[in-house]
Image (cartoon, rainbow, N blue to C red):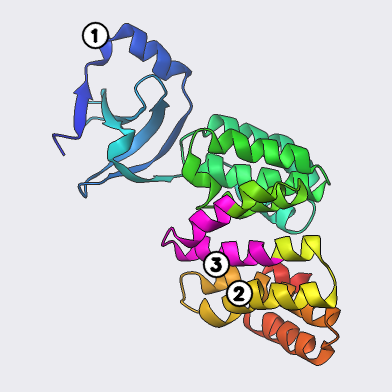
Amino acid sequence: MRRIITAIVFAGVAAFAGELRAAAAAQGTLYTKDGGHKSGVIKWSARNRSYVITQKQANGSTMDMEVEAKNVERLDIKPPQGMDQAIKAVESGNGAGQIKFLEQVVDEYAHLQWDQKAGSYLAKAYLGANNAAKALETCKKIISVDKTAGYSGDLAPTYWQALIKNNQTSTLDQMLAKAASSGDRFASGSALIARGDAIIAKDNTPAGAKKALVDGYLRVILLYRDPEVEPLLRPEALYKAAQCFETAGQTSRASDLRAELKTKYASSPWAAK
């Protein structure tokens, strides 16, 4: 830990302190790549590309410690108040009223874990409001800071939907290829769903539906049964595969998939559609 975390003498670095006072802060725990962790008020320093953790001492004073971003394994930040309500509203198709709140979270939690998740739901809210251009702009803002967000993590699937809506197929193909080769099960499964979506967006005919099934949705249904990703991927794949079977004229197969969706994943937003 000593080689990673360095105590900062707060009183002796006035300019740096001024930056910290202006920075967004949140309560949470920071985990380092050497297996250590520190809890407290966490702030992002854009100047140093590092995190600063403020901890209270036994005597009532505080101490600031700095960790370079390259040495951070992950953050566990307390969710912003109202985040659960906003997520439920977006997932139920009523996200327009949450746009201002989500924009605020994206700005205030930059580099503090919740910016990507809030950005994902903000983009979904824009897509739900038929504003694909704004959805894409939202995604690109986050990806400009973290390029991996374009092909992995919470934001990526929404970014791909925005690319589809904006007919940016070349960029979409690049991101899906990166997701497929990333080794991340959620990213690779989400990429298969997005590939099916892209096919349907171009060709919503029986032939297109069959191709989307084979190249996308059915692969997720059959291959992504591991418990970490199954509830995140299969409900959407089942819903969209059922639509494709209907388009292809195979209504009994569509009914079977919908029955599985409602039985196994009754709490999923896809089961309520």
**Mark 2 Cα-neighbour bin, 10 Å: few <14, some 14–19, many ≥20:** many
Q: Nearer the viewer, mark 3 or mark 1?
A: 3
Is residue 159 visible in the rendered image? The answer is: no
259 in magenta: no
Residue 12, disc:
1
Q: Nearer the viewer, residue 44 or 53?
A: 44
Q: CA distance from mark 3 to mark 2?
A: 9 Å
Q: In the image, residue 96 lies at what x, y percent?
A: 79, 44
Q: Main secondary structure of the magenta part?
A: helix
Q: Nearer the viewer, residue 201 or 135?
A: 201
Q: Which residue position holds label 2? A: 234
191 in magenta: yes
Residue at image point 77% right, 66% down:
200
Mark 3 or mark 1: whose residue is earlier in sequence: 1
Q: Nearer the viewer, residue 98 or 149?
A: 149
Q: Which residues are magenta?
A: 174-196
Residue 189, disc:
3
Residue at image point 52% right, 51% down:
151
Residue at image point 78% right, 85% down:
254
The residue under label 1 is which amino acid type?
Gly
Q: In the image, residue 242 lies at what x, y percent?
A: 76, 79
- Under circle 3, the secondary element is helix
As drawn, is 8 to the left or to the right of 120?
left
- Under circle 2, the secondary element is helix
Q: Quadrant of residue 256?
A: bottom right
Q: Nearer the viewer, mark 3 or mark 2?
A: 3
Q: In the image, residue 238 lies at what x, y percent?
A: 68, 77
Mark 1 or mark 2: whose residue is earlier in sequence: 1
The residue under label 3 is which amino acid type?
Gly
